[in-house]
Image (spheres, helix red, strand yellow):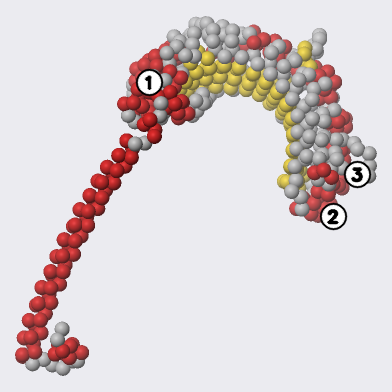
Amino acid sequence: MGPGLEALVSNNEPLTDTQTLHVQQTLQAALTAVSDVEGEILRTIRRLVELEAERRRRSDFTVALKGVLSPIRRIPTEILGEIFLWCRNSSLSASKYSIVDPRQAPVLLGHVSSRWRQVSQNTPSLWDHLHYYSSTSPGSQNQALSLLRPIISRSRGLALDVALDSGDGPVNDIMDLVLKEHNRLNQVYLAMSNRDPPLQYKKTSFPNLSSLSISGACECIDVSQFLVLFSDAPKMRTLDLVSTITPLRSFVSVLRWSLFTELNLTIPLYCWQARDILMQCDMIEDCRFGELTESGEIYPPQHVHQLNHLRILDISIEESIENSHPEGLFEAFAFPQLDDLRIDTTDCPWPGRILPSLYDRSQFLLTRLRVQIRTVDMNAGAEPLVTLLRHLPGLRELRLAYCGIEDELFDAFTYRPWAPLGLSLPHLESLHLEDNENDLDGVVLAEMVESMCAYSGGQNVAFPVLNKVDLYLRGARFSDEVEARIAVACAGSRVIKDHYNRS
């Protein structure tokens, strides 16, 4: 821009004809220059786009070349097969998992490369877990059958673990296919729903079956109906049944209970049925009964049956019948090796002498004791329970709920260095107390809480390793002074977790 144009731009004076013509010529030249610059910008942008595309192509090529040099390509076939084993879902109870699903391992692995497909299909142990989840889509079962047959052949005679979940559709045809491999079955998990038609299978021999788990997902599935099918399984050691249907009385005599080492029966059983089953379980190590119903049909035993291998016992009595006697289930047994005991009842009357009597017969050394009893014989108070605890110095975990948690129990857990040592649990790490009584002495409770705060670790000779105390106490409030003492003690403690709820 020349000096003359700068003067014109910087003032508002009117232009002469000569000046107007000069400005118009200069403007046209400037517009042409701008257009030339814009054209150059567009050419530059197009070039940048071309260069970016070229960069991506070259980058993709370098990635591909790096992939060629990747160490995974040099992994020996045997090691690659071991890696594949860690990719699959081996849990028999995995929800909605199917081995025929192309979106999941091991089928997915075969889509990566021809070598991976060859390795996966020639690794028999990758195909010895058959999971199938049924759906209602048309032809799904026929399609699954066509896929399962070659999968079974890939396992090359290995023992099979099978999980069939009927889900939204039937599994009868799949079951027929599986039963043809009855000599190879090792573990079987069946989750059946009410959509399945009645199964009409004949008794079959399962010479290698070690574990059976059957779950009925609705109120019309009696899982015990399957036991006749699996009754000839001389190596079966684990049984897990879940159902809401009460089995037939003949259920007790269907299986060879003497072979089992682990039982989990979450089905409605009478206590006499549970007792008769346990009487046959000479090798049992882990036993759980859920949803027991107490009845008056159980009679005192003629002799005490000793189960020398039982380490874990979990019993839940869900319902009580008038004039029932739950002690009949326990009086028949002694458990000298018992390590973990859990008892859970609802409205079943529970005599306070049951656990001390069981200890007198068994002389066990528990490390875990969990007791939840809604209706307990309160005439004896907490003294039988405290007496039992004195015989269990190896306890590591103690959970007591609604089972006579009274002042005597709080007093037993109150450490006083100046007094003779009463209750001592040198290995106790966790204590859980839960109750909703209204007649507790708040002063005794406050003294227990304060002692646990004042004397912890090695200072507490009675409970030196106690590091967690949970209090769930509901009912009428104590006096303001007692409530304040408990609140202050809990607030300053790392051990006591106060879940203290008084109305």
The answer to whether marks 3 and 1 mark residues whose Cβ atoms lie closer than 8 Å is no
Q: Is residue 352 left or right of residue 222?
A: right
Q: Can residue 88 be seen?
A: no
Mark 3 secondary-structure assignment: loop
Gap between marks 1 and 2, in whole Å?
A: 74 Å
Instruction: Determine whether, in the image, residue 110 is placed left or right of residue 240.
Output: left
Residue at label 1? 121
Name the residue nearer the viewer: 418 or 81.
81
Residue at image location 49% in from the left, 25% down from the top: 90
Label 2, secondary structure: give it.
helix
Q: Amino acid at mark 3?
A: Pro
State which quadrant residue 176 falls in. Answer: top left
> Which residue: 79% across, 34% down?
427
Q: Residues within 10 Å of mark 3 (few under 14, many from 20)?
A: few
Callout 2: 10 Å neighbours few (<14), some, many (20+)? few
**Image point (50%, 28%), residue name:** 94
Question: Circle 3 is placed at which residue position?
Answer: 417
Picture quadrant of residue 67? top left
The three-letter code of the residue at mark 1 reads Gln
Q: Amino acid at mark 2?
A: Glu
As drawn, 56 above or below 275: below
Q: Nearer the viewer, residue 316 or 15?
A: 15
Task: In this rendered view, identify the residue nearer to me: 220 or 267.
Answer: 267
Q: Is residue 181 above or below residue 196?
A: above
Q: Which residue is mark 2?
A: 481
Q: Are marks 3 and 2 in contact (CB under 8 Å)?
A: no
State the image coordinates of residue 21 (x, y, percent, origin top left).
Answer: 6, 86
